[in-house]
Amino acid sequence: MALPEIVIQPRRSLFSLNLQEIWQYRELFLTLAWRDIKVRYKQTVLGVIWAVVQPVLSTVIFTVFFGRLAGIPSGQLPYSLFVLIGLVFWNFFSGSLISISNSLVENEHIIKKVYFPRIVLPLSAVVTSCVDFFINLLILFAYAFYLGYPPHTSLIIILPLAFFTTILAAAGSGLFFSALNVKYRDVRYALPYFFQLLMFLTPVIYSLNIISGRNSLIMAVNPMTSVIESVRMSFSSDGSLNPGLLIISALSVLGTLLVGLWYFNRTESQFADIA
């Protein structure tokens, strides 16, 4: 049986994304994604339980220290539900980004042996985070209904937008850091600490309403600001989000995605040599 002929052509642009080539390697994508899921849920002691315990435990701790002791306002929502919404989407974002950032280094043995579009590795790394996210989403809905705060019908529109915005934001930053991680291995150790700090610059444990107008616009550069605030509003009636915040966040996602794709494509030819 003749092997398929593979023709490697130079990119037309550093911002280009060959969707046709990625589609041709869809089976590899599915294989890698399924492998990561099995490693995540079948070869650990806690497995799926950890995906449940992590947001619940964090919610309890933040509710005690920031909700009750610090008295941080949460609008019309109970603070526990307020912070759980923030944690579900923040964990999805940070988990996806870190998985993408480590995808090339963790699969360097594959990169050195065979050709395939390297971007398949970061894309497949997102799938496990998506599984965690949907588990956390079920917890969020169950808790919201238990407290008597079911989401408004606006969530039908907001949730898909929030989901894809989070994916794109994580993908843009993740592509950049995954390429950087190949050359500088310290990146994978620094990122988790960086995200611990960044969480406190994102309205996860507090509302954007306590931030002054100018500073809130600066915070909107972080796209998770608009994502979290939008989802919270679909569970309450706390006004509407400033259109300026949405525009800034959209531009931030687009810019991050372009920069990440540009740097990934620019350094892709060196991965096999450096890895």
Image (cartoon, rainbow, N blue to C red):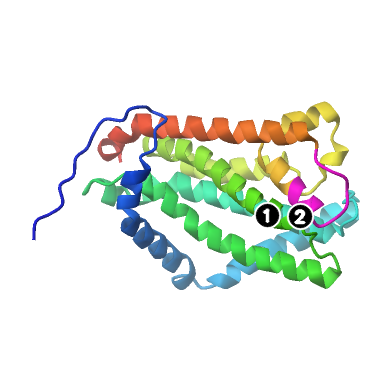
Task: Please state the extent of the stretch shown in magenta in the rendering.
Answer: 229-241
Please report the residue visible at 59 percent of the width from the left and 36 percent of the height from the top: 253
> Image height check: is 213 above or below 235?
above
Magenta-drawn stretch contains 231: yes
Total of numbered circles in the picture? Answer: 2
Q: Residues within 10 Å of mark 1 (few under 14, many from 20)?
A: some
Residue 28 location in percent, x, y?
A: 32, 57
Residue drawn at point x = 43 percent, y = 41 percent = 178
The dot on residue 159 is 1
Residue type at mark 1 is Leu
What residue would you read off at disc 2?
154
Residue at coordinates 66% horizontally, 53% vertically from top-left?
89
Q: Within the magenta stretch, is there residue 75?
A: no
Kind of residue indicated by mark 2: Ser
Q: Which residue appears at 81% of the width and 72% of the height?
A: 146
Q: Is 165 placed left or right of 186 in the picture?
A: right
